[in-house]
Amino acid sequence: MNQPWHATVTLETLRSILEAAVEIRQVVSRRTGLSPVELAALEQLSHGPVGPAALARRLDVTGAAATGIVDRLSRRGHLDRVADATDRRRTQLHITDSAQEEVQRHLRPMFAGLARLDAELGADERAAVERYLEGVLACLEDVIEAPEED
């Protein structure tokens, strides 16, 4: 594969991190007995309640597929359907504490290790890492937001 950059140790490490991020989702999915899309739904709901249509858009699935995902997660006690406070015709989806705990239980060692690494950074190091990671995020978002080619 031709690379448009010189493969530095930093870029190779970043590639490994991105690959590990995909793998960790698969591992947590398997360990929790959730499909990858169900796990992605819980990740979305961990940021706050949303309606079923918004969840479908965020997951890039059809409304019917989102309904199936919501039904399965609801049956497992991982989310609650709550009437919207401003429009009783609408439903908001809320992740349950037990669902958050189940997923967090598998990720806690990773988060603890990352917190330790972060605590070891001095102010100058943190500023450099933040600048780099913000740049990485911007590069990823460029691809995500680019119009699809025919």
Image (spheres, helix red, strand yellow):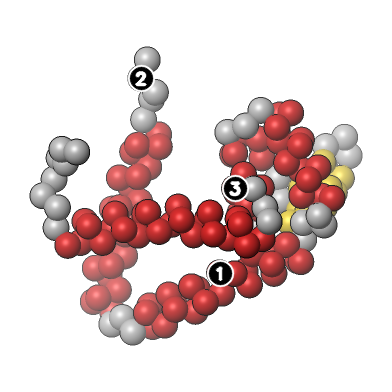
**Residue marked by disc 3:** 36
Q: Earlier in the sequence, mark 1 or mark 2?
A: 1
| Disc 3 residue type (three-letter) | Pro
**Residue marked by disc 2:** 149
| Disc 1 residue type (three-letter) | Leu
Residue at x-position 73% and y-position 41%: 69
Q: Earlier in the sequence, mark 3 or mark 1?
A: 3
Q: Is residue 9 above or below residue 41?
A: below
Residue 79 image label: none
| Disc 2 residue type (three-letter) | Glu
Residue at x-position 23% and y-position 76%: 124
- The nearer-to-camera label among 1 and 2 is 1
- The nearer-to-camera label among 3 and 2 is 3
Q: Quadrant of the N terminus?
A: top left
For label 2, the SS is: loop
Percent across and percent down for residue 135 are 28, 53
